[in-house]
Image: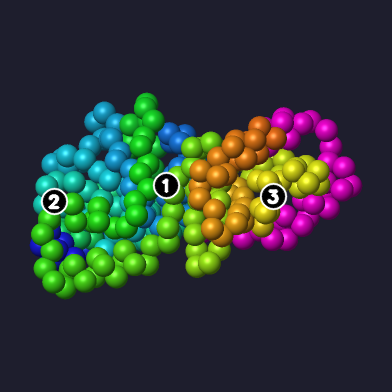
């Protein structure tokens, strides 16, 4: 992209893992971001947000030598897994890089790979994580909430750097591809997004996906799963052990128009989630319908 990212290196020569490590299987983790602050935000930045970042702090004694800070982003230039800026900051892309049964371990491997290369270098390939690779929960300070920032484009790629003509053109093309996305305030991890001529609200629920599905089924059977007139629950994604309901709203509506209804939905959902009653026949049918429309994001 710019001057700070012209040099590219891989980490194949940065201390390759032993044969035993290479063959150690990574344990599958259904909820890989559980235990991190704002689990739902980690799922969102990996699965549904087009352009977002969060600055993270290393736990005491875990900061790699010479690394001043780290930023987790949705995507980096050229879909690089990691980038070590000339100023010492390490960036990683959650939507690129290798994938095992534990995305938290994969991202930790990217973070360590980015820290291992020289400042001003990009990482094009990260060796697959092994069972010995630490997880984000091991590396990061989890004592305080983090600030996940939704961006209108990818200008954060080049903060404080000058771009040549080719780099600026590439950044402009990337920015044009970003669908308008805005955070809503009524519930955590709720996002308004406009795709083409249609508008949606996506909500990452904090509960186990099976329990969340039961609660949605109760609401759907009672005709209480929408966000008011002109809206409807289309279905839900399954992502990192959580459920992401998708509501379609009027195409020309703004996020603020749905805040009150979204808050009311949250209240209904909490009541349905707390119910200990077995699902009725109608609720079971609603649940089957929701499951038939589910898509798993990996």
214 to the left or right of 176 = right
Numbered label attached to residue 160: 2
Q: Position of residue 73 (x, y in %)?
A: 33, 51
Q: Nearer the viewer, residue 129 or 289?
A: 289
Who comes first in sequence, dot 3 or dot 1? 1
Q: Residues within 10 Å of mark 2 (few under 14, many from 20)?
A: few
Residue displayed at 44% across by 49% down: 182
Instruction: Assess whether mark 2 and mark 1 are in contact (beta carbons under 8 angstroms).
Output: no
Decide if residue 184 is in sight here.
Answer: yes
Task: Name the residue tied to disc 1.
Answer: 104
Q: Give the mark, 1 or 2, whose residue is nearer the N terminus.
A: 1
**What whole-number distance in Å separates the C-alpha atoms at marks 1 and 2?**
29 Å
| Label 2 residue SS | loop
Which residue shows up at 53% across the image and 36% down it?
Answer: 186
- Where does residue 184 sit, x and y in percent of width and height? 49, 42
Quarter of the image with the N terminus in it: bottom left
Mark 3 lies on a secondary structure that is: loop
Q: Which residues are magenta?
A: 269-298
Tag shown at residue 229: 3
């Amino acid at each position: 992209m710019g001057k700070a990212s012209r040099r590219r290196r891989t980490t194949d020569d940065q201390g390759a893992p032993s044969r035993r490590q290479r063959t150690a299987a990574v344990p599958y983790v259904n909820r890989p971001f559980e235990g991190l602050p704002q689990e739902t935000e980690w799922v969102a930045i990996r699965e549904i947000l087009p352009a977002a970042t969060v600055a993270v702090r290393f736990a005491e004694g875990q900061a790699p030598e010479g690394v001043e800070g780290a930023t987790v982003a949705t995507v980096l230039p050229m879909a690089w897994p990691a980038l070590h800026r000339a100023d010492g900051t390490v960036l990683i892309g959650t939507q690129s890089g290798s994938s095992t049964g534990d995305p938290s371990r994969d991202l930790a491997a990217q973070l360590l790979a980015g820290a291992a290369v020289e400042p001003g270098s990009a990482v094009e390939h990260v060796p697959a994580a092994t069972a010995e690779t630490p997880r984000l929960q091991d590396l990061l300070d989890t004592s305080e909430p983090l600030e996940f920032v939704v961006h209108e484009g990818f200008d954060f790629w080049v903060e404080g750097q000058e771009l040549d003509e080719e780099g600026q053109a590439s950044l402009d093309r990337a920015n044009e591809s970003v669908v308008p996305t805005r955070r809503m305030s009524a519930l955590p991890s709720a996002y308004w997004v406009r795709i083409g001529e249609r508008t949606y609200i996506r909500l990452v629920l904090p509960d186990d996906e099976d329990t969340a599905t039961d609660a949605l089924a109760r609401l759907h059977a009672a005709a209480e799963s929408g966000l008011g007139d002109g809206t409807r629950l289309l279905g839900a994604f399954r992502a990192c052990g959580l459920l992401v309901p998708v509501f379609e709203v009027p195409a020309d509506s703004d996020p603020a128009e749905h805040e009150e209804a979204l808050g009311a939905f949250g209240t209904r959902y909490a009541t349905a989630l707390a119910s200990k009653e077995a699902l009725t026949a109608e609720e079971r049918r609603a649940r089957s319908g929701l499951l038939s429309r589910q898509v798993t994001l990996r």
